[in-house]
Amino acid sequence: MRLGPLNLASNLFLSPLAGYTNLPMRLTVRELGGLGFATTDLVNARSLIERSTGALRLVASAPGDRPWAIQLFGAVPEEMRDAAVICQELGADAVDINMGCPVKKVVKIGGGSAMMTELEKTAALVRGMIAAVKIPVTAKMRLGWDDQNLTAPDLARVLEDAGVAAVFVHGRTRAQGFAGRVNLAGIRSVVEAVKSIPVIGNGDVTTPEAAHHMLAETGCAGVSIGRGAFYDPWIFRRTDHLLQTGELLPEPDFPERIRVLRIHFERYLEFYGEEHGARLFRRVAPWYARRFGPAKPFKQTILTITSRSDFERCVADYTAWRARFCDEHGELLPKFQPDPMIASFMRAANDPLLERESIPVPKGPVENW
Ligand SMILES: Cc1cc2nc3c(=O)[nH]c(=O)nc-3n(C[C@H](O)[C@H](O)[C@H](O)COP(=O)(O)O)c2cc1C
């Protein structure tokens, strides 16, 4: 798949989850394979121009974190333009504009999903950014402000004329927040509205099969996965494999989950320092534990860690405790196995994609997404 001048290894994207899709997570997920492109969490354009410590940490990247985009939010054309130039100077392969964020502090300044309500003004801002940089500029939007204002197809068309290289569409409105199910017909209407730029579909993809379904139902060129990558950092490799070969790879076993958990943890320590990193990791580890089988002691103890040794003790104690639920090969006995991923999100076995339960929303610094 191509994104402007970039040739991507797959058509699968990591969707930004503020507070989670930081450099440690991006590096960890990329190493597992299958991911074509990743984006930083959203960064306030003005804070980046002011080189605030927080903004610089958000845009931190590394040679293993390629190709990558920085996602900006803001509504002042000059600030968005100057921040885009900084992204280019920082070596980003693309700049993404947040047009979907429903959070009050973003919308109230005219950024995020408020940009979907004023198409001409938004297009002018985007033209200014595109004129200032050589790297591709993309936009990430929802379907519109609410059901009465489904502006995504019109906005995508206007942005294509302005020169954006791709659009990402989360198939919900701002009013919906995260309620209900993703609207695949809404994503399809954006695909049908543009002339030639890729449209990347997004929302509720937690399995390789759901990614395949989104591509088939909407005609989108790629799929962007946020919360699903949290449940399952292996989702990109397994989805890419499914799309390439039609074969569904098995889910990773417990030792593999622990191996990757530990790598992710070590990157947190490297990036944030030992104590702060360990504290921040308390809200990451429970997502891994969802697929461990019985995991209550792990979930309790991990919430108290402040160091590497606490983490290692928690993993060792839990691994020893978990052995009672396993056979002689270390496999969980069938009655303790977690539901296959697909069953935990989808109720009806014969029509799983229609009867989806809602996916929990991780709590982060950006509340009420
Ligand atoms: C905790 C959290 C943080 C998010 N942060 C961002 C963000 O910084 N920028 C953005 O464009 N979208 C953000 N989103 C929206 C996701 O990128 C994505 O569009 C949405 O979660 C739907 O996709 P999913 O079902 O695959 O998670 C966030 C969502 C959540 C739950």
Image (tube, rainbow, N blue to C red):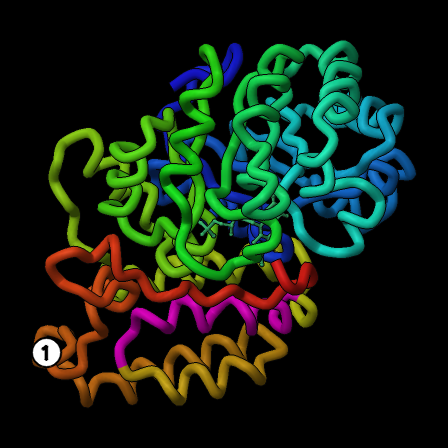
Q: Is residue 275 above or below residue 159?
A: below
Q: Quadrant of the C terminus?
A: bottom right
Q: Position of residue 350 (x, y in %)?
A: 11, 58
Q: Is residue 246 above or below residue 78?
A: below
Q: Is residue 214 left or right of residue 200?
A: left
Q: Residue at x 49, y 86 (%)?
A: 301
Q: Is residue 247 left or right of residue 99?
A: left
Q: Quadrant of residue 123?
A: top right
Q: Quadrant of residue 286?
A: bottom left
The residue closer to the viewer here, 113 or 26, is 113
**Residue 64 appears in the figure:** no
Q: Quadrant of the N terminus?
A: top left
Q: Residue at x 76, y 40 (%)?
A: 111
Q: Residue at x 13, y 63 (%)?
A: 349
Q: Position of residue 83 (x, y in %)?
A: 81, 28
Q: Which residue is mark 1?
A: 334
The residue closer to the viewer here, 343 or 63, is 343
Give the structural element (helix, strand or loop) at label 1. helix
**Residue 79 appears in the figure:** yes
Does residue 288 belong to the magenta stretch?
yes
The residue closer to the viewer here, 106 or 270, is 106
Q: Is residue 290 above or below residue 72?
A: below
Q: Position of residue 49 (x, y in %)?
A: 88, 34
Provide the residue span drawn in magenta.
277-293
Does residue 27 belong to the magenta stretch?
no
